[in-house]
Image (cartoon, grey):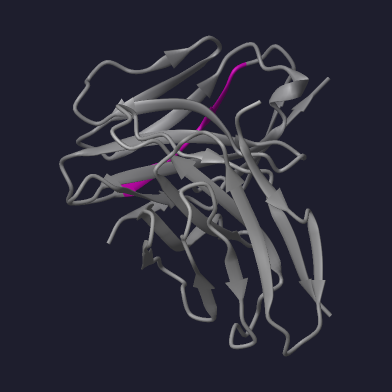
Amino acid sequence: AQTVTQSQPEMSVQEAETVTLSCTYDTSESNYYLFWYKQPPSRQMILVIRQEAYKQQNATENRFSVNFQKAAKSFSLKISDSQLGDTAMYFCAFIRILTGGGNKLTFGTGTQLKVEL
Amino acid sequence: DGGITQSPKYLFRKEGQNVTLSCEQNLNHDAMYWYRQDPGQGLRLIYYSQIVNDFQKGDIAEGYSVSREKKESFPLTVTSAQKNPTAFYLCASRKDRDAYNEQFFGPGTRLTVL
C-alpha cells in the first residue's frame, strides 16, 4: 500500500520569506507522479505543482519549487517570497498508475500554512 | 465555462435517511472520483469510475453507492449504513491519457447529519 506522510500539521512564515513543507511517501511502484495541492479557506483544491518520478530535474512553477529525492522518497515544497494569498492547507499527493490506464491518488494529512504580515 | 459543479454546497440529513450528492462536469473528462475529507485525515477515496457504466470501490466505500450512467455525471449516495457520514465531500475528474494524470476538483459539499 502507498502512504504519504506530512509531519508538519501547521507552519507559519512571514510575508516575503521562504518556507519549506515536507512530505515523504512509501511505495514499491516505479511509475508514479507526485503533486502538491493547495486548499484555501474556500476549500477549492488547486494544483500547485507536479513531478514525474522518472524525471530527476526538480519541478518549478513561479514561486513554487520542489526538492524531489527519489531514493529517500522525499518530496518537499518550497515557497519563495511568501504572500498572504498563500495561506492555505497544503496536501502532498501520490498518484499510482493503474493497469488499464487509470490512476489512484493517495493524500497526506496536510500542512496548514499561515502567512503573516 | 468548463468545470466541475457539486450541489448542494451544504446538506443536512437526519439519521437513518439516504442522501444523494450531485457531481457534474462539462470538461469531457473520462474518469471521475469521490473523496471524503475529515479534519486531520486528508482526503480518502470512496469510489471512482474510469468509463461510463463502470466504477470501482476506493478505500472507504462501505455505506456509499454510486452510478455512472452518463459521462458527465457521477452522483454519490450516502446510505443509512454509513456510520459517520458528517464530512466534506469532494468530486474530481480526469482526462484519460492526460500526460500528467492531473485530477481536477469540484467545490465540495458539506454534509451534516443531525
Between B101 and A115, the one nearer to me in the picture:
B101
| Left or right, residue A97 beside residue B83 | left
Q: Please report the residue visible at 31 percent of the width from the left and 35 percent of the height from the top.
A: A33
| Left or right, residue A41 beside residue A99 | right
Tell me the quarter of the image containing the N terminus of chain A. bottom left
Residue B28, image x and y in percent? 46, 35
Q: Quadrant of residue A43?
A: top right
Q: Relative to residue A28, is residue B78 depicted above or below?
A: below
- Dominant secondary structure of the magenta stretch? strand
Tell me the quarter of the image containing the C terminus of chain A. top right
| Residue B39 visible in the displayed image | no
Between A110 and B56, the one nearer to me in the picture:
B56
Q: Please report the residue visible at 56 percent of the width from the left and 12 percent of the height from the top.
A: A63
| Left or right, residue B59 beside residue A86 | left
Between B98 and A7, the one nearer to me in the picture:
B98
Residue B68, image x and y in percent? 46, 60
| Residue A18 visible in the displayed image | yes
Residue A4, image x and y in percent? 40, 50
Residue A78, image x and y in percent? 50, 22
Numbered marks: total: 0
| Left or right, residue B3 beside residue A36 | right
Q: Residue furthest front?
A: B70
Residue A53 magenta: no
Q: Please report the residue visible at 65 percent of the width from the left and 58 percent of the height from the top.
A: B22
User: What span is in magenta?
Assistant: A18-25
